[in-house]
Image: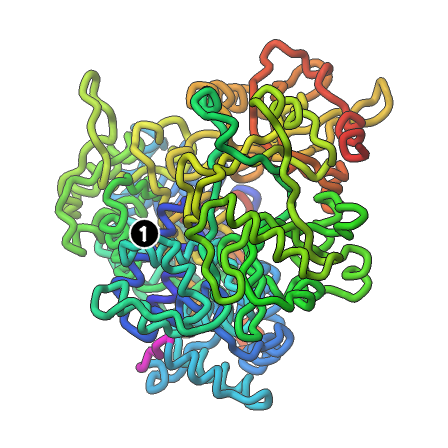
Amino acid sequence: MRASDLLHPRPEGLYCPPGDFFIDPVRPVNRALITHGHSDHARSGHRSVMATQQTLDIMGLRHGEGFAGTTQAAVLGETITLDGVTVSFHPAGHVLGSAQIKVAHQGTCIVASGDYKRQKDATCEPFEPLKCDVFITEATFGLPVFRHPPDTEEIARLLKSTEQFPERTHLVGAYALGKAQRVMRLLRDAGYEKPIYIHGALAKLSEYYQSQDIDLGTLEPATVESGAKRDFAGAIVVGPPSAFADRWARRFPDPMSCFASGWMRIRQRAKQGGVELPLIISDHSDWDELIATIKETGAEEIWVTHGREEALVRWCELEGIAAKPLHLVGYEDEGD
Amino acid sequence: MNRFAELLDRLVLTPSRNGKLTLLTDYFRGVEDPDRGLALAAITGDLSIAAVKPAMLRTLVVERMDPVLFGYSYDYVGDLAETVSLVWPQAPVDIANHEPTLAEVVAKLQAASRSDGPQVLARLLDSASTSARFAIIKLVTGGLRIGVSARLAKQALADFGKVDIAEIEELWHGLTPPYTALFAWLEGKAEKPRKTALALFRPVMLSNAVGDGDLEKLDPADYAAEWKWDGIRVQAVCEGGIRRLYSRTGDDVSGAFPDLAEAMDFSGALDGELLVGDPRQATGTFSDLQQRLNRKSVSPKIQQQYPAFMRCYDALQIGDEDVRGLPFRERRGRLEAFVRTLDPSRFDLSPLVEFTNWQALEELRRKPLHPVIEGVMLKRWDSPYVAGRPKGPWFKWKRDPHTVDAVLMYAQRGHGKRSSFYSDYTFGVWSGPEGSEELVPVGKAYFGFTDEELRQIDKYVRDNTIERFGPVRSVRADRRQGLVLEVAFEGLNRSTRHKSGVAMRFPRISRLRWDKPAAEADRIETLQALLDS
């Protein structure tokens, strides 16, 4: 069977005609298979949703129960047959619960990786390289300029800064699902034992991570209790980046704006955003990880989606690997 | 090298002066010789390394990677040095294991000849980490652009060694990288380095602004008055055949004013104001002076059109004699005699202004006789010349600032304490024919208001945003609605870089005119008239 008959883009998302399902559809559909819980991939309103239990739990937390008609939990590594198409979920190393989806039918095998990374991350299962005919890769950081340094170095810079500027509050901008919990876990692994203060938008998800045995230590709400204004000097506060431009940030003394994101590799991005301490921590693969993964899958053909497709397609051409951009619409980089 | 690279990365993103000082002093404390001294020299611009041209950098990188991929990368990043530092291929492990120190990098770059320079650079980039590569490229392409002046670096040295900055400035030009003796002294491990070099900078004496009620307590008879010239403060020092012209912060600016330096054929040290024109005929305006500022090279034509001269107002040294300890009255006498011996087309004397009481001086201050005068100076007749800004002996009494009513157009978020406030304001005045007026931006200001006013403007900005571009919001501003700001400023320059054709000097918000309709704000012609006067 031709690969493009097994999976191809439709306005709703990536569609599998023989199995009659979509992967990460951006509009409500009959049957959706979902790679991970970021809102551009995991939307509500589908009739049936198949995802890992953790992704289903996260969707429930974000959209409320009843986010889909029916749900079915996929166990990592187990195969399921949907109208004759074999489907299995495998860890993607992106955020808690994230999975690649392997679709096989009549001798053709495609892996839709969703978003993935290869750096070690204590808050989720590591990426599992899968042999396949076609590998669908993301390209969020698909340019040779993106090379993420080890996350431990970045956290060390944050901790050094809290010692250099003990009078200031370090406000760490990190997306609510995945990045925030990873940053907190990295702080704990670096030996930081003080309470970490969190913005309300992070509370439910962080609590969920803790319930999944991911130890984040003591988290306290970054709120000023009525009557007793807490002194946040020297504290680390984690919150969604958007909150720091907001009036919310005024409760902290002389805040130092930090942002944990792969985009922080580019100095001008940090400067434009008024970020004083950029932390290059990403839940997506950098350039080196992308090309190493492509080689590892042994795929004869690469389909490139959301991000900077042209550079990765160019690299594949130079390597003699067939590649094309998928032109899926509706995905933004919420996770970074 | 990594520590230096990290310092540069942090400095460029740290807006506050105190934050920069903390980063610098921590670096001086944590890094050993000679690396810290070389870093200091790189920051103050005293490190000489043969430059590598951007085109060569590009050649080196496309020898190592696909030009198309490099093109995509450069398009995205927009800065050549940064792109090259990021895409440079990872070196084989055996090379990458040794992270070079700043001293090693500098030594290799300084030893490189013109022909092997690019290859030396390439080998260094192979051995460095990503951010170290960026720092190395910045060193060889010249200009770190990290927002740290030589003055701020000296302040950090003073903080580090807990000494007065004047002591650093006084020594500075006798020292060379990597400043080992200086650091040893600042750490209390050695005596203060002795001044052995000739024609060193003498730390300058500064004045305080006249505050409310200050004058009532002073006797006019104790003070001399002079015009306050709106040029640039310079110190001309000639000693043992060495001639140097210094800025007020001790930077050597001789190179920018070769015509004036040429005429410095005396022995001594003079304090005064650098202006343009011919002192015997006419003094140029600040706009004229600007033709001589911030230039890499000064053409003969510009030198002829805008000749530099020095209007002298104090003597620090005459011949071999240090006269700083003498009272002003005596120094002034010595200065008058001394200036008479100098080239009259390049040096003249700042005249004293006669007055009998403060009232009379007030009249003169308000109506100065030349546009390049920005007020009067008061100097106590019996005061010695001392470094720094002592309260009492010298006062500046400026003429009142100009003001204009402008309309708020854009607001940008601030940093640190102000990071959640829209605190940097771009404002404009009306231009164009009646019926189709448009606002044209004339300046930007980020202070002059109280904390309460800041909160009010911030709210106004958030409630009246039309568009956002990153940290900037465009605010509704038309004939019917807009926030009028009274902006005070010290003067106007012609500018070809701004659409309005004018650039304000030292603009600040003096009042919020909530009461004033936007349509009644000033027109550009009001400012243009000021320019022509």
Q: In the picture provided, is B507 more to the left or to the right than A283?
A: right
What quarter of the picture does the C terminus of chain B occupy? top right
Residue displayed at 29% across by 38% down = A58
Quadrant containing the N terminus of chain B is bottom left
Residue that extends furthest to the top in the rendered view of this protein: B515
Q: Can residue A8 be seen in this view?
A: no
The magenta span reads: B97-102
Which residue: 47% across, 44% down?
A: B206
Report which residue position mark 1 lands on: B22
Q: Which residue is drawn at 68% across and 28% down?
A: B428
Let me know if residue B100 is in the magenta part.
Answer: yes
Residue A47 position by quadrant: top left
| Left or right of A282 on screen, residue B336 | right
User: What x and y, as percent, mark residue B19?
Assistant: 36, 47
Q: Nearer the viewer, residue A21 or B335?
A: B335
Q: Position of residue B284 (x, y in %)?
A: 76, 46
**SS of the residue under disc 1:** helix
